[in-house]
Structures are given as structure tokens and as C-alpha cells.
Amino acid sequence: MNQWIVPLIAFALITTLGYFQGRKKNRWISGWIARESEEALKPVDTQYTNFGGTIGYNFIYKLKKPFQEAKGTFTLLPRQSILYLPISFLITKHDRYYMNLFIQGKLLGEGHIVSSTYERKARRTIHGVESMASEEVYKNNRRYILFWKEQGMGERLRNFLEKIAHEELLYHFCCYGENKTFFFYIKPERGKLEELLKSALPELKPFFIKGAGTDD
């Protein structure tokens, strides 16, 4: 029985050390995600709600025109659990950043940009995707699939993808005309999240109904 004492003590020490180091790293990641989000969006008011300890946060930003508010979530890998972390890498693979950007005014309609690595799941979650127009496009040797309904949306999606920075971190972008929102699903990376969001915001203007025209 004594032969197990040393390995058990070592295991306990390793898991305890991993817990505190993982918590510390997730807190650090949460901090720069929040800072880069705020730096890009310039909210007039912010609200964060923690869930799961260091697993993630829900956030609400009050914004200036032409936006109203941003509501989102960022979820982090369970770095505090060295036992579950390898499983999480297999299932979720990376930290995640989701944001709905609510606007004032009207949008042209519905359109999606989906990374090829997210295509299978996106096809299951986009309502009516089988009836939408679609197109494959490439940027920096990465494949993306565009889906849209309204005339004029396809070109706007192509232009948006072409102009944003760090598009490799974008898994799903959507313009939802019906509920007046833009949706972003991003893999957050330090120093790149802010640049991606900053580059994306001015490129949202063509999706507003005032700029609608005909193409496609």
C-alpha cells in the first residue's frame, strides 16, 4: 500500500498546481479579451457576468449610433483542470468568442460567411440554408462558404471578407435583417481580436438598407 503514497501525493500536487496556474491563465485571457473588445467597440457602458468561475463571461455593451448594444459570451478552455483539459481540446479545441451586435435602422437581409472548418455545424444551425444561394470563396488559401437570400447580399459578403483583418479567426459571420443584428463567432487571439473587430465595424455599413443596391 505504501508504494502508492508517493505517486498519489505527486498526483495531488500536480493537479493542485495545475488548478491554480490554469485559473491564473484564464483570468489573464479574460482580461485581454475584455480590454480588446472594449477598445474596438468603444462602449459607453459595460456589464460582465461571470459563469463557471474562470470558464467565461457574458457581456453587454451599450454602444453609440448606428449601433445599440453588443451582447456576447466568451468561453475558455478549462485550463484549471488538467484531467479534463485534454478532452476539452478534442471537443471544443479552442477558446470561443460570440457576439451579437444590435443596430439602429434596417439591414438588407440575411447572409452568412462560414469558415470551411465550421461548415458542417453551420449547415445544421442556419435555418433554411438549403434554399439560400451559396458560393465558395478563398482568401489567403483558406476556404469560406457564403450563404445569402437577398439580391445584393453576396457581393457585400465577399467585400466584407476581403477587407477584414485576421479572417482566419472568423468562424461565422452573419447579417440578420429580420432582428437587426450582426453575429460574430471568433477564435480570440491576443492582439488580433481587437484588430479584427476594428476592421470589421466600418465594413458593416454596406449591409444597411440605405446602401442596398443590385448585384449578384
Image (cartoon, grey):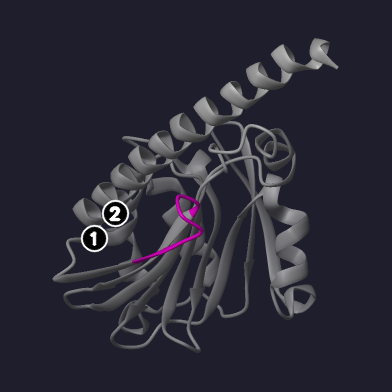
Residue furthest left in the image: 44
Q: Nearer the viewer, residue 197 or 211?
A: 197
Q: Is residue 148 left or right of residue 175?
A: right
Q: Residue visible at 71% across and 71% down?
A: 125
The N terminus: image quadrant: top right
- Secondary structure at numbered mark 1: helix
Q: Residue visible at 71% across and 79% down?
A: 127
Q: Is residue 43 left or right of residue 139?
A: left
Q: Amino acid at mark 1?
A: Leu
Tell me if residue 186 comes above or below residue 100 in the rendering. above
Where does label 1 land, which residue? 41
Tell me if residue 86 comes above or below residue 59 in the rendering. above
Q: Is residue 157 left or right of residue 67?
A: right
- Marking on residue 37: 2
Q: Position of residue 13 (x, y in %)?
A: 57, 22
Q: Is residue 2 magenta?
A: no
Which stretch did the figure color magenta? 49-55
Tell me if residue 169 comes above or below residue 14 in the rendering. below
